Image (cartoon, rainbow, N blue to C red):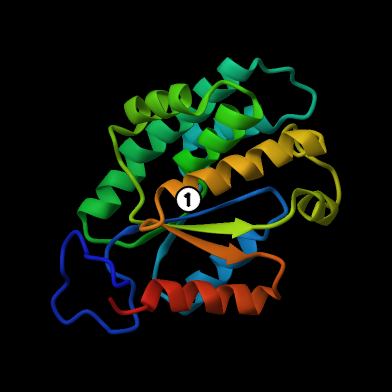
Amino acid sequence: MILVPRRAAAGAALDRFPAVLITVEGLDGAGKTTLVGGLAAARPVIVLREPGGVEVSERIRALVKEPGLAIDGRAEALLYAAARAQLVAERLRPLLEAGETVLLDRFVDSSLAYQGAGRGLGVDAVRALNEFATGGLRPDRTLLLRLDPSVALARLTGARDRLEREDLGFFAAVAAAYDALAAAEPERFVVLDAARAPDAVVADALAALDQPA
């Protein structure tokens, strides 16, 4: 489905995405970084990540990923929301209002899955928190990399951050929440088989984003 741009650009090239917010979601180890890189190489987009993208949010990123810190689930959700609020205010809204296309590695759906389901805080409670944090900003399309949690964990190499150290049960709950979110909004979500070769996943994503109505 072709996305309706927020602001049509005169003479825009046919190989460009419309001016929209495209988010990439999935478990740690599912291949989000690889997919984002492949899409950015194929189309002119501005790439941002969460938590991060601006100085305040990058500082929060270092905090929430610190392996040695014990952070309460509610505090964790609030920290992610704070980082997101700063990114939206400082970068996301200005870019989108200027007609840019933004490719964002994680957004609100990550908190719904990880804190809402994984931490057991409740998807509705975390959704309400993030509505406030983002001012209601929503992605136009979301690319969800679906992968068996045990396979995703096996892909993680090297030192793991605080969230990556969670057990299989945690990631199974996160994966189930992602599936539920995708089922509830099929017009927004594109579900990709992350078990396929990276080049094939990128091709699948491009085909889905470029598919005519």
**Label 1 belongs to which residue?**
183
Q: Residue at x 72, y 40 (%)?
A: 171
Number of numbered discs visible in the structure rendering:
1
Element class at badge 1: helix
Left or right, residue 1 beside residue 38: left
Mark 1 residue crowding within 10 angstroms, few (<14) / some (14–19) / many (20+): few
Which image quarter is the C terminus in?
A: bottom left
User: Toward the viewer: 167 or 62?
Assistant: 167
Above or below for 170 versus 103: above
Q: Residue at x 67, y 60 (%)?
A: 31
Which image quarter is the N terminus in?
A: bottom left
Left or right, residue 155 beside residue 177: right
The picture places residue 130, in percent across and down from the top left corner, at: 40, 29
Above or below for 169 versus 184: above
Q: Which of the 4 quarters of the picture holds residue 5?
A: bottom left
Left or right, residue 42 beside residue 210: right
Q: Which of the 4 quarters of the picture holds residue 148?
A: bottom right
Dot 1 amino acid type: Ala
User: Toward the viewer: 141 or 184?
Assistant: 184
Q: Residue at x 42, y 75 (%)?
A: 43
Above or below for 144 versus 45: above
The picture places residue 15, in percent across and down from the top left corner, at: 34, 83
Left or right, residue 125 beside residue 134: right
Q: Residue at x 27, y 83 (%)?
A: 13
The picture places residue 75, in percent across and down from the top left corner, at: 57, 16
Q: Which of the 4 quarters of the picture holds residue 21?
A: bottom left
The picture places residue 196, in percent across and down from the top left corner, at: 70, 73
